[in-house]
Amino acid sequence: MSVTVSQTQTLAQSASTPRRTTRFLDSRPVWLVGVLAVLAGAVVTEAFSLVCRAAGVPMAAASPGAKEAAEIPVGGFAGGVIFWSVAGVVLAVALARWAGRPARTFTAITVALTALSLAGPAVAPHTATSTQIVLSVSHVVAAAVIIPLLARRLAHRSR
């Protein structure tokens, strides 16, 4: 099997596209990368929830003290990601300014907070086990999108 010059060029171009994107993000302000990461995390998490809905997972959860579960609306997962991630973006901006090793500190704090956030779905009363699992996995999905993007940006100091 032989590889032609045009196939090699196509492979090289497709391999360089992610590098160009990450270089673009590395040179942007931390807050902007944070906003883009949060939006990406919200979209991916909402898509995950929609797939789970389509598979028949009931989307109703209760807060502690509630007498019954309430329906989680379409868009609720994305809204939750955006709402709770604001603190993460503020943390990233502060660490970029004042921390000696902002990427490492950000990753350690946000991974610990993500692990802590799994307690909420685990103890949600009047919530189906399948819904609790979807809620927990959605926390991990959002973190898996947002944390690496912001940590990568924090690893590249502004010039």
Image (spheres, grey):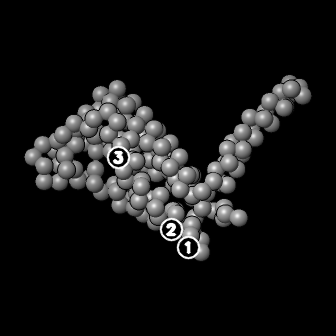
In the foreground, 67 or 131: 67
Name the residue beneath numbered marker 2.
94
In percent of the image, x 80 and y 30: which residue is there? 10
In the foreground, 93 or 104: 93
In the foreground, 103 or 27: 27
Nearest to N terminus: mark 2 or mark 1? 2
Amino acid type at circle 1 is Ala
Q: Is residue 153 above or below residue 74?
A: below
In percent of the image, x 26 and y 38: which residue is there? 72
Name the residue beneath numbered marker 3.
80
Q: Quadrant of residue 70?
A: top left
Give the alpha-carbon distance from disc 3 to disc 1, as whole Å.
28 Å
Give the alpha-carbon distance from disc 3 to disc 2, as whole Å.
22 Å
Q: Is residue 137 visible in this depiction of the protein?
A: no
Query: Percent position (x, y) of residue 63?
Result: 19, 50
**Which dot marks residue 141?**
none
Amino acid type at circle 3 is Gly
Quarter placement of the N terminus: top right
Q: Nearer the viewer, mark 3 or mark 2?
A: 2
Determine whether label 2 and label 1 are within 8 Å by CB. yes
Query: Percent position (x, y) of residue 104?
Result: 56, 67
Name the residue beneath numbered marker 1.
99
Give the alpha-carbon distance from disc 2 to disc 1, as whole Å.
8 Å
